[in-house]
Amino acid sequence: MLNVRISIIFLSMLLIGCPKASSSGSSDLLGVLAFLPSGQASDTPVAKIEISYNGVQQESGATIDLGTEIINLSEANGKSISLTVKNMGTTELQMPASSAIVLSGSHTDSFTVVQPNKTNLAAGESTTVQIRFHPIDLGINNSSISISSNDEGISNFRLSLTGTGGPAAPRIAVNTGSTNISNNGAYTIGTVVSESSGSPVSFTVRNSGSLQAVLNAPVVESSNSQFVISGSTAGATLAVDGNFTFNVTFSPTSPGAKNGTIVVNYTLGGSPATFIFNISGTATPIPVPTIAISHNSSDYTSGGSIPTFGVIWPSLSSSSKTITIQNNGTANMTGLVVTEFSGDTTHFETSVLSTGSTNLAAGASATFTVRFSPSSTGAKSMVLRVNSTNGNNGTSSSANINVTGTGKTGADVLVSWTATNEKAVNATDGGYKICYSKSSGFNPSAENGTTIFCDTQANSGGNTPNSKVISVNTFGTWYFKVYAFGKYNTTGGAPSSESSVVVPST
């Protein structure tokens, strides 16, 4: 009887009996078959190994060609590749801790295997295996590796390794610090202010090959004079594993992105050869201060006239106007000075800068104020000058700002009275005296033109006037009296009672 192991889950069974004879001489086969449902897998956890190279899954028994490499290299200088080991199963993949990867074959000295840093992989987890090719023989060098694990399907995964050993030769390698630069690779040197020099960057050139290198003059050269070569310690030759250094200094002459190439010249196989890499850097504009002058959001960087202060009584002062100076540049502004340059300077008052300094940092601002304080009547004007030693993008700047105002001459007051005398048509004699003073109870007869003033309103024809507009010369309370006079009574009659009016200061 044929024994068949039956899985836990099944759909149908067929009975298969032991063979027996039939009348036709044929036999029937009886037994039991178990079937799993379509699309379902066993519930038993399994570990499953998968090996890939350059993203391509490898089958056990496949061959990986490591290409051509020069012979007699040190192990560290050989060609290096990485294999990825991944657990595609549902339980932990286990490999021997000390010898997960075993190297064998006729050229084991031409290959080195670096064991993975992890030998037990959870489901879905992966690790890498590094293989180095450093051939010792010319021509084909063969070896193989085996990877043991608890994968029941492939407990010993094997890959063949092959590579070709070429003649011994020099090989140039370049690095700066821990950064290795490949042939035809690139290096970014950073950012430097235009028209200045950055810090020198040191590069090391090493012969990682298996034959002395003959160096050709110029050993190191730059295609762009803004990347300056200096400090080279190269000789005429470079021994195996020997090295020399050189510096590159980025010295841009103008702002913007800069590019060039650095070339190391040597001999390979009797012919000139080069190791070349691209170098790039960015030059920023030279930091300069940039002055901006404004008042009430209007620009006066190039000068101009701010709105007038209007009419102000002498001895009074207007409200202040604020002017702002801004450094919109990227460097310190120096020699910042505001002066009352010309004009009626005694009638205006200008404050010192709010910062109290002639320097203004990048992005900072300062203010000053000016106000109108006339000491006499009439139109007044002054030129304010704002200077700096470097505010014009690094050069000196100067801006003239015009300010104006008017000293008030007087205020008009309408004085009216009740007429007390009449004249015939065409009579021209007589009229009224309108007297005024800032002192209450003044005597009109003491008119002096300084503290007591009198204006005449003569009769005109047959009209007897009863009002006159008087212009007073300052603000405050004024007192008025009116009296009539005639042709034969020039001293006039008795003055009216005193009236007053307040003239505002604005």
Image (spheres, grey):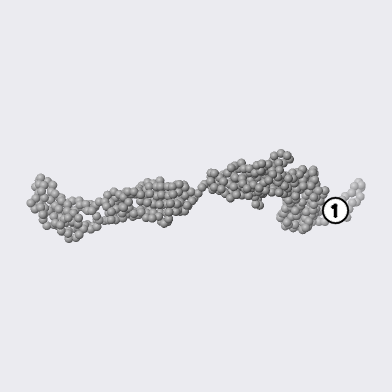
Count residues near mark 1 (Cα–Cα under 10 Å), then give few for <14, some for 14-19, many for 20+.
some
- In the image, farthest residue toward the top: 271
Rendering coords of residue 154 (x, y %): 79, 52
Q: Please, what is the three-letter code of the amino acid marked with disc 1?
A: Gly
Residue in view at x 71 percent, y 39 percent: 271
**Foreground residue among 436 and 394:** 394
Rendering coords of residue 199 (x, y %): 58, 50
Q: In screen coordinates, is 402 left or right of 21?
A: left
Is residue 306 visible from the viewing direction of this image? no
**Foreground residue among 99 and 409:** 409
Q: In screen coordinates, is 249 left or right of 42?
A: left
Q: In screen coordinates, is 301 left or right of 380?
A: right
Q: In screen coordinates, is 208 left or right of 20?
A: left
Rendering coords of residue 171 (x, y %): 71, 45
Residue in view at x 39 percent, y 54 percent: 368
Rendering coords of residue 391 (x, y %): 44, 49
- In the image, farthest residue toward the front: 235
Name the residue tied to disc 1. 31
Q: Secondary structure under badge 1? A: loop
User: Does 221 appear above or below 373?
Assistant: above
**Quadrant holding the C terminus:** bottom left
**Quadrant holding the N terminus:** bottom right
Residue in view at x 7 percent, y 51 percent: 488
Is residue 401 visible from the viewing direction of this image? yes
**Foreground residue among 62 and 81:** 81
